Image (cartoon, rainbow, N blue to C red):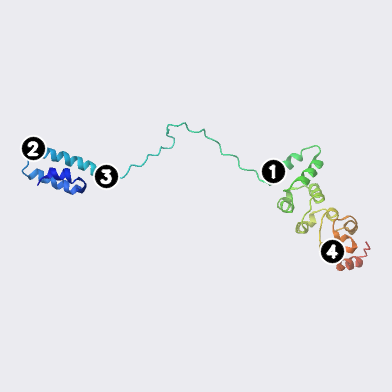
Amino acid sequence: MDILKLLLESTEDLCSEDLDFFETELAVGDYDGAYRAACKSEIQALRTQLHRLAAPPLKKREPKPGASSGFPEPASREAPPAPVSPAQLVWDSIAVIREQDDYKKAFRRFVKDSPVIDSGFLDTHFSRFKSWEMGAILSLKPLDEAFLEKYFGALDHDKIARYQLFSERFFMKHFAQLNPDIVLAHGKNSWRVREQRSRQLDVFLRLKGIKL
């Protein structure tokens, strides 16, 4: 068997088991020293090649945390502060206004210009407002009837009568607390004008002795 010829000409067809066989054959066969040496050299080269083909590709080593990558590390930055909610901005402003000499004037101006202060905001933060502040808000901001109903007992009734819009039904329900002279002569409801009232309210007012 010409082992050297097979090693040189059939390189792509040989496997590790073939090389093992050739090594055994060289050890027991009648081959001279120079031939054995040439074959063993080729066998060793083929084993190295087979090992390289069978080995998995090397993964790119990731730098360890804190290890230098050869490039300057960016300066560490502190996490940006959490955004302040619109509600918190309102309360921060009110806290400052309450300390001012022209507190009441500044408060009214702030409330009038604030798009955040509405029925929903007031419902959530009702207990945080002072009584005077809530009265000022009643005179400046249109509030929905559900809010007026919910907090009716705690609100200034004359300011509701003069500055707020509400239904005839609401007026009749709270007639004893809402001054009819203010509601009908100075209020903002369209039905305060007799020609725009419902027949039900007209009858109700006559029964109450109201002739406006």
Say what amino acid the circle numbered 1 marks.
Leu
Q: Earlier in the sequence, mark 2 or mark 4?
A: 2
Residue in the foreground of this view, choosing between 128 and 89: 89
Q: Which residue position holds label 1? A: 89
Say what amino acid the circle numbered 3 marks.
Leu
Q: Closer to us: mark 1 or mark 3?
A: 3
Residue 73 coordinates in the image, percent (x, y): 48, 33
Q: What's the distance in space between the residues labelled 2 and 4, CA to CA?
A: 124 Å
Q: Earlier in the sequence, mark 1 or mark 3?
A: 3
Q: Earlier in the sequence, mark 1 or mark 2?
A: 2
Q: Is residue 146 visible?
A: yes
Helix, strand or loop at label 2? It is: helix
Q: Quadrant of the C terminus?
A: bottom right
Q: What's the distance in space between the residues labelled 1 and 3, CA to CA?
A: 67 Å
Residue 204 coordinates in the image, percent (x, y): 88, 67
Q: Which residue appears at 89% of the width and 63% of the height?
A: 195
Q: In the figure, is residue 104 to the left or right of 72?
A: right
Helix, strand or loop at label 1? It is: helix
Residue in the foreground of this view, choosing between 141 and 210: 141
Residue in the foreground of this view, choosing between 5 and 16: 5
Residue 172 position (above or below residue 1): below
Within 10 Å of the Cα at label 4, are there few (<14), some (14-19), or many (20+) other Cα atoms?
some
Say what amino acid the circle numbered 4 marks.
Met
- The tag on residue 172 is 4
Q: Which residue appears at 21% of the width and 43% of the height?
A: 47
Within 10 Å of the Cα at label 3, are there few (<14), some (14-19), or many (20+) other Cα atoms?
few
Say what amino acid the circle numbered 2 marks.
Gly
Residue 24 coordinates in the image, percent (x, y): 11, 46
Q: Which residue position holds label 2? A: 33
Q: What's the distance in space between the residues labelled 4 and 3, CA to CA?
A: 95 Å
Asked whether disc 1 touches disc 3, contact meaning CB atoms under 8 Å apart, the reply is: no
Q: Which residue position holds label 3? A: 53
